[in-house]
Image (cartoon, rainbow, N blue to C red):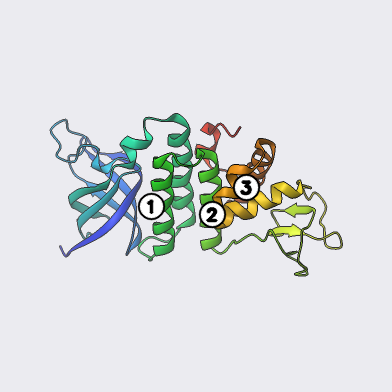
Amino acid sequence: MPLYRDEAVVLRTHKLGEADRIITLLTRQRGKVRAVAKGVRRTTSRWGSRLEPFAHVDLQLAEGRSLDVITQAETLDPFNSRLGMDYDRYTAGTVMLETADRLVTEEGEPAVQQFLLLVGGLRVMATGQHGAKQVLDSYLLRSLSVAGYAPSFDHCVQCGVEGPHRFFNPSAGGVLCTSDKLPGSATPAAETVLVLGALLVGDWPVVHAADPRHLREASNLVSAYLAWHLERGLRSMAYVERY
């Protein structure tokens, strides 16, 4: 079987037979890949924690008819062990993995931007330099943008008039002016809209200076925006203590 190498993040795993696992990966060059790790569930397995969710690894794989087979795995960054020591960061990271899995829909299709965004987000999450919930919200907005669902927080999404604007609607794709507001639109505080814009572009000084109530409101709007575009909620989101 032809061999190839790629860099990957482990998104999820499930059992196969008595000793194997199917590993779902987001790779740098081939996008989402499902591969078999043979014997990984045996206590004598050489894989150890290298093929657990969050692991950032360098892999050698053999191409198969339906599933590729992992033949080598080397750890590049042990996000799984670093995030596992903090509940908030672990649960937020789990949402990041599920989001990447849902947004990258086609197996074998390159998704370099999503891969780089996930690795960067997990690295920042693991350092602890920013709040777990803010890192998650920033990642969610950016990953949706890469997937083609970029929100607008400074211009009306209907007419393009520059803000600030009072209304936000997930189905419209961002903020709306008074003339174009839709029924059921949220009316966040002006400070909340600034926080949303800062999360989208990674303006961390603005995020750090924000009042907790505006961070909470922004987080709720990010969740609503994500749920709208994914069409159904994330199972892992239920475990995140939003605020």
Q: Identify the amino acid type marked 2.
A: Gly
Is residue 59 rendered to the left or right of residue 23? left
Q: Earlier in the sequence, mark 2 or mark 3?
A: 2
- The residue under the point 70% across, 56% down is 171
Q: Quadrant of residue 47?
A: top left
The residue that mark 3 highlights is 222
Eyeballing the image, is 54 above or below 202?
Answer: above
Q: Residues within 10 Å of mark 3 (few under 14, many from 20)?
A: many
What percent of the width, then of the height, locates residue 7?
A: 28, 57
Horizontal side of residue 230 vs 111, given as left or right = right
- Nearer the observer: mark 1 or 2; the answer is 2
Q: Is residue 72 left or right of residue 96?
A: left
Q: Which mark is residue 137?
A: none
Decide: is 41 above or below 66.
Answer: above
Residue 97 located left or right of residue 66: right
Q: Circle 2 sits in a helix, a strand or a loop, which is it?
A: loop
Q: Amino acid at mark 3?
A: Val
Give how far apart the Cα atoms at labels 1 and 2 are: 15 Å
Residue 231 visible from this viewpoint: no
Which residue corresponds to the image point at 26% horizontal and 43% vertical from the top-left? 51
Three-letter residue code for mark 1 = Val
| First along the sequence among labels 1 and 2 | 1
Q: Which residue is mark 1?
A: 119
Residue 146 placement (x, y as % from top left): 51, 62
Which residue is nearer to you in this view: 157 or 138?
138
Q: Earlier in the sequence, mark 3 or mark 1?
A: 1
Secondary structure of residue under mark 1: helix
- Report which residue position mark 2 lands on: 202
Question: What residue is at 57 percent from the left and 49 percent from the top?
Answer: 205
